[in-house]
Amino acid sequence: MASAADIDFQKSVERLLKQQPGWKKATQPPEKGARPGGKGVGRPASGTAALELVEQDASTRQYYEPVTLRTSDGLFSIEIEPIKQIDLRGNIPFRFAEPAG
Amino acid sequence: MDKHHPAPGHPLSRVRICGDCDHGLWHADTDTITTPGAVEIPIRGVAPAQTREYESDQGDSIAVRVPATPAVARSPEELAADAAAGRTWLDYGILAGGARRLYGHELGERAWIYCAPDGSRWVARIGLGSPTQLTLQRFGEIPGSPADAGPVQAAVIAFSVMPSLTTPPWPDYEYNVIDDVRSDGSEAIVSVGYHYSQSNTFGAGALASYGLRWPYGVYRVAIAGTPPAAVVTVTPMYAGLGLGYLSDTFGGTLNLRGVHVFQAEHDSTALYYVGNYGDPVTPPPGTVEMEYWNLTDGTTTGEDLYILGGCYVADVATPVLLRKSYVVTTTITWIEVEGDPFTGIEYTESYDASSTITLEIGTSVVGATATDAGARIGYQSLDILVETPPAVGDGAMTLGGLTISARPSAGAADYRIASTPAELSHHEIMPMRVGNRVWALCLINLGALAPEVGGYLDAENRGWGGHTHVGFVSPTDAVQTLVQRPLSLEREDVTGYASAHPTTGEIAWSWDHPVCWV
């Protein structure tokens, strides 16, 4: 059921179409089916590349405290440091959550 | 994410170190490892195994060093955390026990790791077939290949002397054992022979489950090059039928102290004697010599040297030696037995004897010196039947400076003063392999054993105590001890259990449960 606001909005559109018939096309639903190809018209902001996540310096990687893992038979152990943060180009820190266990 | 990452649940993590970090001294009674930080941790996988009957290999602990492996670098904080958690990171592996435990798995007897010049690692294994062969199989390659499932090379080992040991199955008392392995696996010491106790069916210890080694051969088996083109060579440290006998020396100065007995030429009841003190003997006028009693005194010395096996000292093949030396000094004085006419002499033979037994690995030595001194009263007579005076002697004996016994009767000097080896009274000298780099020297008091197991039949000779340990020796350590053990002939009761640390040589030992550095 249409609300009172919807009815007010519809009446306003009808008044507009009477005064400026050229807007009638805008009130028609989009055609169904594949959209035809076309050229994009958007432009990036000045000085900004497309979103590229590039690490700035591998030597600045940061790690969480070491974790020692054992194989299921207990015979082989691996000490690892989970990754904590890498620094992306543009001084953007990319921080990882500390894994459990 | 990469399922082949060593920690697949932690992608992008940095691997700091990996391997087996459960190291320390394993105790069989608790089946735990005491780490260098004194933390008790369970042993994972198989425990070090005992694989032989007449001597121990459960304490074997052989370092495996892959050349160019970097040293373990840990910060003080990391070391503290490791110690608290019972972790010990090493830059070498350890083959532990007779079955050569590595990473909790057994490589098997007569097997070790060979590091080839190109950096590849191989399981080297000596078989029991005839001819004896050494096989080489790829080890530790990531990723492996189906070709790694079997040996890529088998080389015949040309032992120069290996009687009766080339046709399996071997009887239990014969042995073919990898005594020790160089740290890069490029050489191993192989000993072959048999155990004394099984062949000596009459003497003390005949039924014992321990046995002195009588080696036919102690060999260095060397591997060079990279399989399948490796070259295997054999160099004897000892080979022959002399049961390990390397040398003997015998010396000293013995003097004839004979007694010449003369009889008047025309009166058979007139007897005279002249002692020979080194000067020319001048018969009394009108007499003829009718008897000569040959007595000797002076000093005799001797030394016998045996090889028992071998081990590596700083990666140099070194024989395990048993050295027995002795010095005996006797002096003789005599007096004429009262009587008319002269019928004989009574003499006193004073002796001062010292016999030293040492077990040696390089410059590490354990041993014992037994000393004995006293006098023996002898009697030489022209009578056919004469009652010999009883022997006297203090019989005090010390081992390693500790007085352990005063025998009830010294009788005579308990040493052979001929060219045969010296013997300690009532003792069997028992050097025994306890681990690849730890051997025990035991003095076993045979007098205390029951006759059915080789002890003396007469009670008066069976006196005190059980058997007496003298000590353990490793290339860099020696532990001297003195313990009276139960009157058992089990191998474990003879030596206890011991293990020498693969790099420091520190000896760990226990009387009642196996131990091993893992």
Image (spheres, coloured by chain):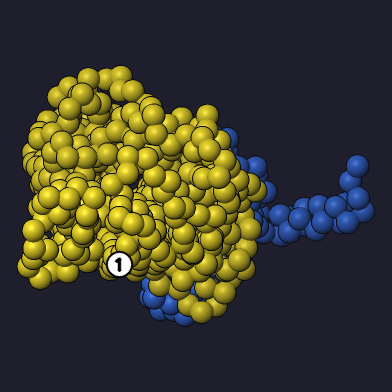
Chain colours: A blue, B yellow
Can residue B193 be seen here? The reply is yes
Q: In this image, B282 relative to B478: left or right?
A: left
**Residue at 49% over, 64% down:** B394
Mark 1 residue crowding within 10 angstroms, few (<14) / some (14–19) / many (20+)? some
**Residue at 35% over, 31% down:** B200
**Residue at 71% over, 54% down:** A17
Q: In this image, B30 relative to B100: left or right?
A: right
Q: Position of residue B337 (x, y in %)?
A: 36, 59
Of residues A81 and B355, the one drawn nearer to the viewer in this rendering? B355
Q: Position of residue B293 (x, y in %)?
A: 21, 52
User: Which residue does the numbered mark 1 point to in the structure image?
Assistant: B333
For residue B384, which quarter of the picture?
top left
Q: Is residue B404 above or below residue B42?
A: below
Can residue B422 be seen here? The reply is no
Of residues B461 and B133, the one drawn nearer to the viewer in this rendering? B461
Q: In this image, B399 relative to B128: left or right?
A: right
The quadrant of the picture occupied by the N terminus of chain A is top right
The quadrant of the picture occupied by the C terminus of chain A is bottom right
Q: Amino acid at mark 1?
A: Thr
Element type at mark 1: strand
Q: In this image, B118 relative to B483: left or right?
A: left
- Number of marks present in the image shown: 1
Q: Is residue B223 above or below residue B146?
A: below
Q: Chain of mark 1?
A: B
Of residues B474 and B72, the one drawn nearer to the viewer in this rendering? B474
For residue A37, which quarter of the picture?
top left
Q: Position of residue B461 (x, y in %)?
A: 52, 45
**Residue at 52% over, 67% down:** B403
Q: Position of residue B369 (x, y in %)?
A: 38, 65
The residue positioned farthest toward the front in the image shown: B266
